[in-house]
Image (spheres, coloured by chain):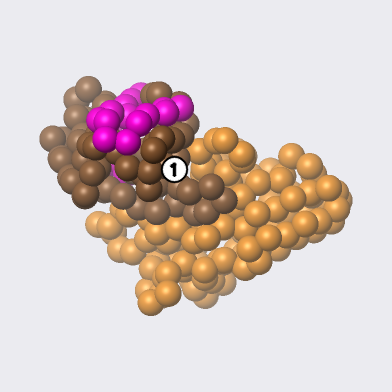
Chain colours: A brown, B orange
Amino acid sequence: ELKVEQNPLFLSMQEGKNYTIYCNYSTTSDRLYWYRQDPGKSLESLFVLLSNGAVKQEGRLMASLDTKARLSTLHITAAVHDLSATYFCAVDLSGTYKYIFGTGTRLKVLA
Amino acid sequence: DTGVSQDPRHKITKRGQNVTFRCDPISEHNRLYWYRQTLGQGPEFLTYFQNEAQLEKSRLLSDRFSAERPKGSFSTLEIQRTEQGDSAMYLCASSYGTLSYEQYFGPGTRLTVT
């Protein structure tokens, strides 16, 4: 059974600081996705990583994928309050289209 | 295109009642997915359709749950004899084609069973 784990589960950080969220998964997959969710809202797609070594950046967020280590990272540079949200990674099993989501990381950026 | 839409956005029902939710995917998206998300957790896969065919159902989907996608366009998710444990956000997503794996999520339907 595919398991997806994120750490940390909760992250409180000050504006201007850098931090990394980690996403580990338990079986082979070449595709990993990052989503953002604001309280009471749906999921907003951030990054789609489709191969080993993929790196994507958007604003203060950068995501990478290492399929051999079964690890993805979401790096936050110089955090701002607007980044406060819950971040989920998701993996889909090779040959299927369903997503298995991680536990989520609740990020709070303090002014 | 306006994205994935879901109706209703909120539903409060009494235990034992039946409820039905609707999802309209992005037009021309041939795959449609249902997920359930409880408070503080990540979404859990329930089922998915390719066109009108239901290709996979999770073990989470008990026999009180049924989903349809007639004509391969909108989909409905029905829960019969609701229980308090069914209270959750029900999310619908859609995707297109055989090479595109990215799923686009709707706003969700929040169900509260009293």
Magenta span = A10-33
The answer, for residue A71, to whether it is visible in the render is yes
Relative to residue A64, is residue B63 drawn left or right?
right
Q: Residue at x 66, y 66 (%)?
A: B8
Rendered position, A4 above or below B74: above
Q: Residue at x 21, y 30 (%)?
A: A67
Q: Residue at x 52, y 60 (%)?
A: B107
Q: Residue at x 83, y 48 (%)?
A: B114
Q: What kind of element bears circle 1?
A: strand
Q: In the image, is residue B57 part of the stretch drawn in magenta?
A: no
Chain of the residue where label 1 is placed in the rendered structure: A
Q: Nearer the viewer, residue B58 or B39?
A: B39
Q: Which residue is mark 1?
A: A85
Quadrant location of the N terminus of chain A?
top left
Quadrant location of the C terminus of chain A?
top left
Q: Residues within 10 Å of mark 1 (few under 14, many from 20)?
A: some
The answer, for residue B33, to whether it is visible in the render is no
* Amino acid type, residue under disc 1 in the picture: Ala
Relative to residue B98, is residue B13 drawn left or right?
right
Relative to residue A62, is residue B4 drawn left or right?
right
Q: Position of residue A107 (x, y in %)?
A: 42, 35
